[in-house]
Amino acid sequence: MRHGTRTTILGLGLLTFASASGGEIAGTPTQAPPFIERDVELNFSNDFLGRGGSVDDFRTQQIILTARFAENWIALLDHSILTLSDPIEEGRLDQLSGSIGYRLINDSGPDKVNSLTVGGGFRSSGDFAGERMQNGFHRLIGSDVESLPYVATNRTDATLWLDAEHYRLLRPGVGERFFGSWSSGYWLRGNTLLTSDGQWDAGFGAYAVASRNSIDIWLGLRQDWRSGYERDAVQSATANAEQDLAVVLGVRFGAIMLETVQQTGNKASYGQLKFIASGRKAFPANSTWPRMSFEFGIVLPDIQVQLAGKFRSKLFTSGDSGWRESVVLETKLGEPQYGSNNAVFVRSRQLTVGLEWERQLSNSAPWISAYGALGGGWRSEQLIGDNALAGQKSDTTHRGVVNGATGLRFNAAKLGRDWQYRLQLGIVAWAPLNDATVLLNNEAFRVQKPALGMTLGMTFEYR
């Protein structure tokens, strides 16, 4: 047995024993078969993707952004929303985690992957706009608003984590009885994390994997352990709910992955929807830049949907310019929460027209581009009451608005001969030309205020 394989399996064994007092992995890499390349990944996790929303508690929403750089280095940012609706000890808490990891072992071949990654960072607990994000998303899909107070926990701790994986492709003929022409293998994964507050998280999973072209399917069992979460009722209940044996089913179609984790004893089942940019595909040459593109994104933390159509233009650029220029027609819509007031929501509609400029980031990273956009148009806002103010509405205000955006795009996958798919991460800002004051339940509220948000999304481009 080669050194890399021995070390990885030893690491998995140590993690299994350590898991007897371990827990959840907020702040560590997300789960996927290790042979799948993931240079950039957006991960959306929600209990709604578990058992269809049978319980809206514990780690109810989670967003993770992961990026690989310098071959063996990764960086990630994790935002989790924890809730507990127990009438005796109800409450909510957000977790914000960030870390850097380095792959100590990267022993890969056509029929195997052995990896061992170590990392460290921070995990903060407190109020990180989770209520606004959760309730804004609920208003978007017509679900109930969650009115829960934040618990008193407010602290930041250092984290140290370890992640070990072993994948082996079965010999030809071994898996054909079950998978036919699909290639088949097995995958083992163990990970663990320790915080300076004494919280210990760990998990271990064993899966069968079948692959064919750009499709992968995995099925197996995963066991999680938790300890050290007695600081408040929300964390304690979440840890107890996540500590269980679960059946895991996952599938990848090109740049999209969907995984569901169904617990056998508890109610914290969840699902994950992942969008990946892999393979570091080169950015297209100027002459082949798309004629048009369509964009879908989510604005955070005041949840709004952003849709845009873009059409190639040359108003301020020449034919040999390294910049791609587009005319942009964009709309934003949603009902975000009015600050910390979970009884008032802002029904928002915005339509703008503008220009966008985009350029390859560098010759060393041709699969990444930077963009900037500026436009103007119209925005309407109306206050809508919920909870104690259910059924009440304010007048609708209309204002001219200036809109700007900047960020990065990452080549993800080709969709046939003429279409391409990319991930997008950016910042968006809008400023109505003047504000307004409206009345709701005889109370005055200021609306049409300048705002800044983060956008996570994707673009589909036609050549």
Image (spheres, rainbow, N blue to C red):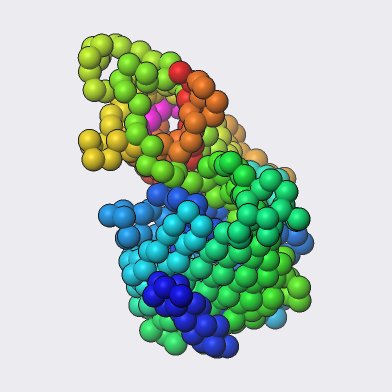
Side of 215 where 71 appears, left or right = left
- 128 above or below 376? below
Residue 188 at what x, y percent from top left?
A: 56, 69
State the image quarter where residue 240 is shown: bottom right
Q: Main secondary structure of the magenta part?
A: strand
Residue 371 at what x, y percent from top left?
A: 32, 32
- 185 above or below 369? below
| Residue name at image x 23 percent, y 40 percent | 364
| Residue name at image x 32 percent, y 60 percent | 73
Task: In this rendered view, identify the residue nearer to me: 179 or 97.
Answer: 179
Count of numbered circles in the view: 0
Queried whether the magenta region covers residue 404, the answer comes back as yes
Task: In this rendered view, identify the residue nearer to me: 313 or 110.
Answer: 110
Queried whether the magenta region covers residue 145, the answer comes back as no
Side of 357 where 3 appears, left or right = right
| Residue name at image x 76 percent, y 73 percent | 264
| Residue name at image x 54 percent, y 88 percent | 17
- 201 above or below 437? below
Residue 434 at what x, y percent from top left?
A: 38, 32
- 329 above or below 332? above
Q: Could you tell me which quadrant the C terminus lies in?
A: top left
What span is colored magenta in the figure? Answer: 398-405
Residue 24 at what x, y percent from top left?
A: 54, 74
State the image quarter where residue 120 is shown: bottom left
Residue 406 seen in the current view? no
Task: In this rendered view, identify the residue nearer to me: 394 or 318.
Answer: 318
Residue 317 seen in the current view? yes
Task: In this rendered view, identify the residue nearer to me: 401 or 36.
Answer: 36
